[in-house]
Image (cartoon, helix red, strand yellow):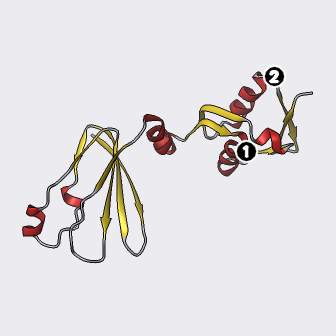
Amino acid sequence: MRASCARRRRATSASRKRVTEGKVRLGAVLPAATDSMRSSVAVPLVLAGERAIVARPASAAAAAPQIDKIAASAMRQALAWQERKLVFEETPLREAAAQFNRRNLTQLILADEELGARPVGGVFAADNVAAFVRLLETAGDIVAEPRGGHEIVLRRAR
């Protein structure tokens, strides 16, 4: 069984669990105040491909968790950081470039706004800007021009 956890802190925080394999029983995370309350609350089971959001209200009352199915593509995207991968599905090039720029010394610069709207897709090593650029160039409509030591300007081929 593998589960991924994400927590968000607010006035009333919530615990988010994504189950990637197997199943997870949520008994330990339910906010029941006493053992007698805990035994009276149905303990949900979260299966692979599902997400549970368990509210942690300021009061001691137990709240039923919200359990949702997660699309396989959304699960891959949410967990890609663990493998240092970037997952793009019809993602505008400006967003893909921004993702690479956040993680690398070499920065991608888009020569024009229209190029930034071009959709890209695929799974890429987050630290391999060169492979991403080579893929963009193979289509023939984008040219990459190195500028300085750590910039690559992407422009439309003429």
Residue 17 lies, in percent from the top left, at 34, 52
Amino acid on which the number 2 mark rests in the picture: Gly
Furthest toward the right, the residue is 158
Residue 112 lies, in percent from the top left, at 86, 43
Q: Residue at image x 6%, y 68%?
A: 36
Q: Nearer the viewer, residue 86 or 105?
A: 86
Q: Residue at image x 12%, y 72%?
A: 34
Q: Does residue 37 sit above or below 133 in this rendering?
A: below
Q: Is residue 84 left or right of residue 38?
A: right
Callout 2 crowding tier (Cα within 10 Å): few <14, some 14–19, many ≥20: few
Say which residue label 2 marks.
140
Q: Does residue 57 sit above or below 82 in this rendering?
A: below
Q: Does residue 66 sit above or below 14 in this rendering?
A: above
Q: Nearer the viewer, residue 85 or 34?
A: 34
Labels 1 and 2: the sequence-earlier one: 1
Residue 91 lies, in percent from the top left, at 64, 39
Q: Quadrant of residue 144?
A: top right
Q: Does residue 155 sit above or below 60 in this rendering?
A: above
Q: Whole-Å distance between the Cαs marked 1 and 2? A: 18 Å
Q: Is residue 73 left or right of residue 149?
A: left
- Dot 2 lies on which element? loop
Q: Which mark is residue 57?
A: none
Amino acid on which the number 1 mark rests in the picture: Arg
Q: Residue at image x 86%, y 38%?
A: 146
Q: Nearer the viewer, residue 85 or 14?
A: 14
Q: Which mark is residue 94?
A: 1
- Dot 1 lies on which element? helix
In what quadrant of the picture does the N terminus appear? Answer: top left
